[in-house]
Amino acid sequence: MSMLTITGGKPLEGTIIVSGAKNAVLPIIAASLLCGEPIQLEDAPDLLDVNVMSKVISALGATVERDGSTLKIHTREIDCIEAPYDLVTQMRASIVTMGPLLARRGHVRISHPGGCAIGSRPINWHLKGLEALGAEIKMDHGFLDVSSKGLKGARIYMDYPSVGATENIMMAAAMAKGTTLIENAAQEPEIVDLATFINEMGGKVRGAGTSIIHIEGVREFHGTTHTVIPDRIEAGSYLLMVAATGGDVLVQNVIADHLKPLIAKMEEAGIRMMEEDDGIRISGKGVYNAVDIKTQVHPGFPTDLQAPFMAFLTRSNGTGLITETVFENRFMHVDELKRMGADIKIEGRSAIVQGIQRLNAAPVTATDLRAGAALILAALTAEGTTCIRGIHHIDRGYEQVEKKLSQLGANIIRDE
């Protein structure tokens, strides 16, 4: 079984380049199903999830080729309407193929998706939006059978600003007849990047990044080349790792505006950061104060950085309170951190983190993607050598993590 072996105690120093955003490229790959002409995606990270999504659209009839950080996609013929069960159950994000496939072919069959077990993420918001556009939805032996004789624009109010549902509805509406208005839409940067991609193909999407998105349906799309935005969660994870180890690093290919909640909290803790022309420079002395965070939908503090931030707080001065409002089961990393000596108490949806002088190395297991990043951070600061298992979760969202951290001086190796 593969694992990461990390010997802690070394400050991270140097320069690190952030990869393209996982959570942006996945719906963009799905959106390529709207277009019958060649698509080229630049800065597409080579991640497990990206490979799975590539296999999903390949099974539907697309051709996908990787050349370094470039993905070349051609969906001239979509000869299948059923996403393969074994792939869909590996990754929840595959549900976003439903909207574009319905728009392109008028019919799609897909099983309930898989992914990290971090809590209930109902797809009823996806289905409600597609039904408003004119889709008919049936359950058939564990599969969702979604069909339409012609999608029509509609006014859709989202009960919750779900990212995936906003993406699915936006892609389906991009080819619907007439105008669609999505109210209480998700506002994440990844939504903006998807809208940019759709517009580059000839779509008409306005308002992405706000709570109201307007989509004017078009009949055809054309090929394009698109550069994926930087991964704000990867960038945030590395900023926290540098701060926790007392390092000095220039983090390149990062958009500071996408990280405002994290940067504000890190500066409140006493971490020095400076925007430069080519990135963010962070200098940490390994000494900082505890702060409180509360996860919220964008533009609030991102739930995907809650686990790494908790690991960061284990080395702080004082007591910090973390309140998780997005997912109800996202404290699975707590027991693993406690194995390393962390002082953490759970009370409902809150975690009380008491900073300690040092963590101690221990064998631990990544229970999900962001828990894996938290354990890497903890291992980098711990006394001794930590072995992290379950690293397939980490490979879902952090490209060549051991190579990037090694270049900063970390003592980290991958054992196959």
Image (tube, rainbow, N blue to C red):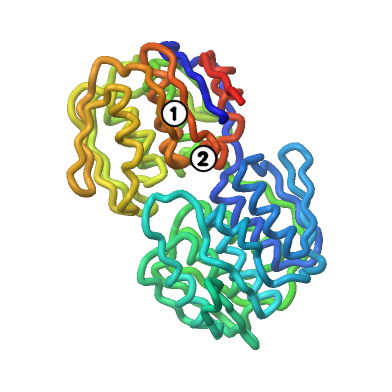
How packed mark 2 is, by other alpha carbons closer than 10 Å (few <14, some 14-19, many 20 or more), is: many
Check residue 393 in the rendering and tell me which mark sits there, or answer none: 2
| Residue 124 drawn at (x, y percent) | 43, 72
Can residue 81 be seen at all in this image of the molecule? yes
Q: Residue 166 versus residue 207: which sits nearer the camera?
A: 166
At 48% from the left and 30% from the top, the residue drawn is: 389
Q: What's the distance in space between the residues labelled 2 and 1, CA to CA?
A: 20 Å
Looking at the image, do the residues carrying marks 2 and 1 touch, with CB atoms under 8 Å apart? no
At 62% from the left and 57% from the top, the residue drawn is: 86
Q: Classify residue 59 by image quadrant.
A: bottom right
Amino acid carrying label 2: it is His
Q: Is residue 267 left or right of residue 197?
A: left
| Residue 330 drawn at (x, y percent) | 34, 46
Q: Residue 415 versus residue 373: which sits nearer the camera?
A: 415
Judged from this view, the residue extending furthest toward the bottom is 149
At 52% from the left and 71% from the top, the residue drawn is: 142
- Residue at the spot of label 1: 239
Check residue 61 in the rendering and tell me which mark sits there, or answer none: none
Q: Is residue 200 left or right of residue 14?
A: right
Q: Classify residue 371 by image quadrant.
A: top left
Q: Is residue 178 left or right of residue 158?
A: right
| Residue 57 drawn at (x, y percent) | 70, 60
Q: Classify residue 346 by image quadrant.
A: top left
| Residue 135 drawn at (x, y percent) | 56, 83
Amino acid carrying label 1: it is Leu
In the rendered structure, which disc, 2 or 1, sits on the residue that comes first in sequence? 1
Q: On screen, 5 above or below 100? A: above
